[in-house]
């Protein structure tokens, strides 16, 4: 009997597949569909501080009285947050799988206000969608410091597991993850995929780039999952960014992941892909004589292979002779 149970960030999952935060996880109906299709856990659509502020700014322009504007802002903000808390409560009521809330904020004090209410609404864990782009106006370690400060402050008020969704552009990823672990974070998601842009050369303007990831994006995710789980033992990592097949899920687990987040593939193929992936993962385990995920989780990570430098190879030297 094959058992796909695993753990991620202190949560018990019936299988490692997790629906990543997106428009597919913003209503109870969609969440329930994902659960019925067999998903192991769900990360809700992020609550964006920026969205709330933009919305309230627009509406408060309708009045000339500063006190009224403050009142409107507070009202709108509460309303937005209340809706999100309702989503958590209803999702918890409707589903048995762990429900992970997600917040995106950019002022550290606001993260804390949101986090406390989210915990009280019953979320099983909290994923932090931290996004600070340093286009040169901040110091060298601004992004890294933001992660550290946010986790440090949140840990003072939050008991539920804190998961950090990491950006790719961090100079010493294992070092930062190790630090977040020591501050009390319970898991990291590698990686967040941010809004992609493009340039329209006909109209000479900046446009939106591809919304979904490609299978080729997974190589980087795999490399860093293997390195981080090898370098930061006893800390849970979930793969995200580029998981498009059951084979990717198996590779992610071999590299050390406890959770496998899916987003683009769910958009492209619908919830039915979950059952297909689980069936084929089980089949692979059967063929390779594994009964439990723990028997092969991390088997090929940075710590457990004979030649870990394979994960550090970044130059194409091997191909110089074949490709001219
Ligand atoms: C339409 C769309 C909406 C998304 N919304 C969020 C969001 O609200 N919060 C978040 O943390 N990530 C969001 N993401 C990022 C995904 O959760 C995921 O990290 C990213 O798509 C990479 O995974 P994938 O390769 O499986 O698509 C969104 C992605 C897409 C395509």
Image (cartoon, rainbow, N blue to C red):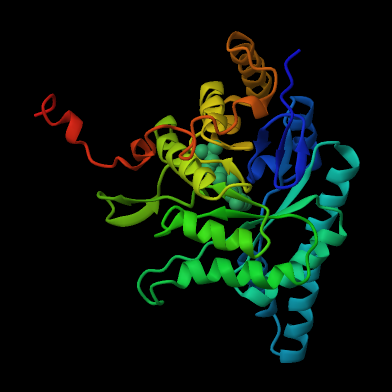
Reply above or below: 92 against 70: above
217 sits to left or right of 28: left
Which residue occupies the foreground of this view, 277 or 21?
Answer: 277
| Left or right: 308 in relation to 314 | right
Quarter of the image for the C terminus: give it.
top left
Q: Can residue 216 be seen in this view?
A: yes
Which image quadrant for residue 305?
A: top left
Instruction: Please give the count of numbered marks on the rendered protein.
Output: 0
Q: Which residue is drawn at 45% across and 39% down?
A: 302
Examine the rendered structure and indicate whether residue 244 appears above or below residue 131: above
| x then y, percent, for residue 318 | 19, 30
Q: Quadrant of residue 34?
A: top right
Q: Which residue is drawn at 21% across and 36% down?
A: 316
**Quarter location, residue 67:** bottom right
Give the quadrant of the N terminus: top right
Q: Nearer the viewer, residue 10 or 112?
A: 10
Looking at this view, name the residue that lies furthest to the top. 287
| Ligand 1 quadrant assignment | top right
Horizontal relation, residue 21 to residue 170: left or right: right
Position of 16 relative to 288 (above/below): below
Question: What x and y, as percent, mark residue 175?
Answer: 48, 59
């Amino acid at each position: 009997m094959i058992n796909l149970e695993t753990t991620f960030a202190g949560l018990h999952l019936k299988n490692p597949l997790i629906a990543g935060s997106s428009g597919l996880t913003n209503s109870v109906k969609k969440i329930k569909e994902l659960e019925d299709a067999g998903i192991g856990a769900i990360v809700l659509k992020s609550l964006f501080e920026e969205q709330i502020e933009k919305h309230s700014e627009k509406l408060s322009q309708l009045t000339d009285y500063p006190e009224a504007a403050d009142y409107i802002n507070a009202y709108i903000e509460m309303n937005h947050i209340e809706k999100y808390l309702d989503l958590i409560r209803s999702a918890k009521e409707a589903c048995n799988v762990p429900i992970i809330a997600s917040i995106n904020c950019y002022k550290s004090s606001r993260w804390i206000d949101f986090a406390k209410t989210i915990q009280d609404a019953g979320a099983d864990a909290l994923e932090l969608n931290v996004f600070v782009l340093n286009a040169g106006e901040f110091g060298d370690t601004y992004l890294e410091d933001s992660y550290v400060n946010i986790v440090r402050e949140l840990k003072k008020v939050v008991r539920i597991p804190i998961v950090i969704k990491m950006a790719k552009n961090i100079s010493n990823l294992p070092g930062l993850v190790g630090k977040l672990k020591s501050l009390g974070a319970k898991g990291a998601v590698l990686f967040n995929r941010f809004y992609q842009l493009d340039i329209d050369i006909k109209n000479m303007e900046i446009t939106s780039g591809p919304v979904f990831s490609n299978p080729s994006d997974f190589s980087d995710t795999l490399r860093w999952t293997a390195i981080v789980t090898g370098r930061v033992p006893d800390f849970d990592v979930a793969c995200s960014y580029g998981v498009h097949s059951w084979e990717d899920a198996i590779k992610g687990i071999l590299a050390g992941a406890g959770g496998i987040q899916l987003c683009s593939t769910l958009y492209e193929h619908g919830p039915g892909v979950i059952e297909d992936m689980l069936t084929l993962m089980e089949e692979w385990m059967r063929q390779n004589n594994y009964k439990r995920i723990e028997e092969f989780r991390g088997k090929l990570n940075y710590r457990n292979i004979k030649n870990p430098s394979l994960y550090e190879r970044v130059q194409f030297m091997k191909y110089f002779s074949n490709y001219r």
